[in-house]
Image: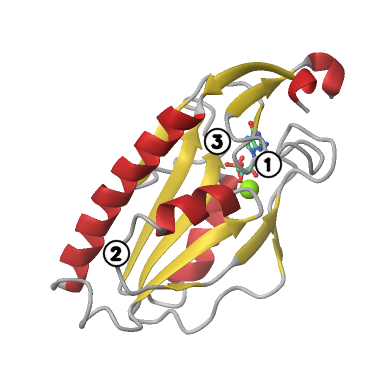
């Protein structure tokens, strides 16, 4: 695996520190939205929605930084089928989470590129009339957004390069690599 990677863009200690910071910020904001201490009032009101599969490692680390009573509902989205590094349009896999009316919802994705994924997902969620809807991405490629989409929380702004690791894949591989890295051209 390591020999397919070109260089490490963000190493694991930097990722961990940032996820910790994001967790503190998000917990503070959600507690405020709930109008309480995040325990009693939050019962059933807080739903975190990871966009699979890329966000799974990030979400696993992030939720453990949130001392709030929340539930997880998954949404599957495919935009980079197989060996492609350009977005192919967004398709929702399976059912979207239901019964989000009146809930405080946080959608979490691995990376914001064209912005289409989060644009589509948040539009669909909004039709269910949640009490609030926030979005969090670990990575953002600035200047590439084809739709004007502003996430509420961004881990890192990165240059316009295809990255893998920490949940992000190329053709299904490298998700388990613990740092965020670029791929060697020969590996594509
Ligand atoms: P968008 O819909 O914003 O163009 O793209 C978002 C999705 O595309 C992400 O959830 C991710 O799955 C995929 N994606 C965008 N850029 C990259 C990248 O550099 N590496 C990987 N592995 N996936 C990416
Ligand atoms: Mg994705």
* Image position, residue 85 (x, y; %): 75, 31
Callouts 3 and 1 close, C-beta under 8 Å: no
Q: Quadrant of residue 46?
A: bottom left
Label 2 residue SS: loop
Packing grade of label 1 (10 A; few <14, some 14-19, many >=20) is: some
Precedes in sequence: disc 2 or disc 1: 2
Q: Which residue is labeled 2 in the image?
A: 67
- In the image, the residue with mark 2 has its CB under 8 Å from the nearest atom of ligand 2: no
Which mark, residue 84?
none
Q: Callout 3: helix, strand or loop?
A: loop
| Colour logic | secondary structure
Front-most of residues 15 and 83: 15
Q: Residues within 10 Å of mark 2 (few under 14, many from 20)?
A: some
Is 47 situated left or right of 80 in this image? left
Cβ of mark 3 under 8 A from ligand 1: yes
Contact? badges 2 and 1 (CB < 8 Å): no
Q: Please tell me which residue is depicted at 36% across the width and 35% down the height of the picture.
A: 17
Give x and y (percent) for residue 149. Answer: 44, 43
Q: Earlier in the sequence, mark 3 or mark 1?
A: 3
Relative horizontal placement of residue 174, taking residue 144 as reference (left or right): right
Q: Is mark 1 within 8 Å of ligand 1?
A: no
In the picture, the disc for residue 176 is 1
Which residue is depicted at the point 58% across and 68% down? Answer: 74
Residues marked 3 and 2 touching at CB (< 8 Å): no
Identify the residue at horizontal 66%, vertical 54% (top origin): 53
| Residue linked to disc 3 | 146
- For disc 3, the neighbor class at 10 Å (few under 14, some 14 to 19, many from 20) is few
Which percent across, then down, holds residue 72? 49, 71
Q: Is residue 182 above or below residue 70?
A: above
């Amino acid at each position: 695996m390591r020999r397919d990677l070109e260089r490490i863009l963000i190493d694991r200690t930097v990722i961990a520190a940032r996820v910790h910071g994001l967790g503190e910020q998000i917990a503070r904001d959600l507690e405020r939205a709930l109008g309480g201490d995040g325990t009693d009032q939050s019962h059933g009101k807080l739903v975190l929605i990871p966009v699979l599969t890329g966000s799974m490692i990030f979400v696993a680390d992030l939720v453990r930084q949130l001392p709030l009573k929340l539930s997880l509902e998954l949404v599957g989205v495919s935009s980079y089928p197989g060996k492609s590094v350009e977005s192919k349009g967004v398709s929702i896999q399976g059912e979207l989470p239901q019964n989000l009316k009146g809930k405080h919802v946080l959608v979490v994705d691995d990376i914001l590129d064209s912005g289409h994924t989060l644009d589509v997902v948040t539009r669909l969620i909004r039709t269910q009339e949640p009490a609030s809807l926030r979005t969090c991405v670990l990575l953002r490629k600035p200047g590439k957004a084809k739709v004007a989409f502003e996430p509420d929380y961004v881990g890192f702004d990165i240059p316009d390069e295809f990255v893998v690791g920490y949940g992000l894949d190329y053709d299904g591989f490298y998700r388990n690599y613990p740092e965020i890295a670029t791929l060697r051209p020969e590996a594509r």
